[in-house]
Image: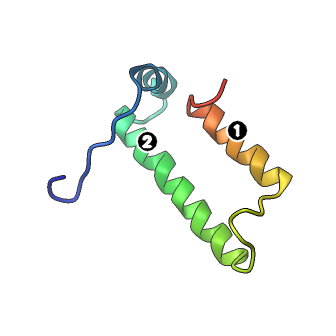
């Protein structure tokens, strides 16, 4: 890791899929898109964590599970 950045390795198929997804989307690169998605995910996590600070991490609602599966599918991790 150098400076303020780190390298993350992802499967080539996922990279290629993301590259197709971002074409004509306004994102200049797959890296830019991934940073956007991860920032959004972290932001949602922090918001949900603050709202549900008494809830343990093991206790996910059916809606939360559906949302997680949907995100993983859109990122290419689930079929």
| Colouring rule applied to residues | rainbow
* Left or right: 32 in relation to 24: left
Rendered residue at 43%/40% (across/down): 33
Packing grade of label 1 (10 A; few <14, some 14-19, many >=20) is some
Rendered residue at 39%/32% (across/down): 10
Residue beneath label 1, please?
Answer: 70
Question: In the image as oriented, which residue stretches furthest toward the right?
Answer: 62
x and y percentages locating residue 23 in the rendered image = 45, 23
In the rendered structure, find residue 2 and report the number of the disc placed on it.
Answer: none
x and y percentages locating residue 36 in the rendered image = 46, 48
Residue 78 sits in quarter: top right
Image vertical order of residue 69 relative to residue 49, above or below: above
Question: What secondary structure is marked by label 2?
Answer: helix
* Left or right: 63 in relation to 75: right
Gap between marks 1 and 2, in whole Å?
Answer: 16 Å
* Left or right: 34 in relation to 29: right
Q: Upstream in the sequence, badge 1 or badge 2?
A: 2
x and y percentages locating residue 43 in the rendered image = 55, 63
Question: In the image as oriented, which residue stretches furthest toward the left?
Answer: 2
Rendered residue at 70%/40% (across/down): 69
Image vertical order of residue 39 relative to residue 46, above or below: above
Quadrant that contains the C terminus: top right
Question: What secondary structure is marked by label 1?
Answer: helix
In the rendered structure, find residue 34 and report the number of the disc placed on it.
Answer: 2
Packing grade of label 2 (10 A; few <14, some 14-19, many >=20) is some
């Amino acid at each position: 890791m150098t400076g303020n950045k780190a390298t993350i390795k992802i499967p080539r198929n996922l990279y290629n899929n993301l590259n197709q997804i971002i074409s004509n989307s306004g994102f200049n690169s797959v890296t830019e898109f991934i940073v956007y998605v991860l920032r959004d995910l972290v932001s949602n996590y922090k918001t949900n964590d603050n709202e549900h600070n008494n809830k343990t991490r093991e206790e996910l609602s059916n809606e939360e599970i559906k949302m997680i599966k949907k995100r993983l599918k859109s990122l290419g991790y689930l079929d």
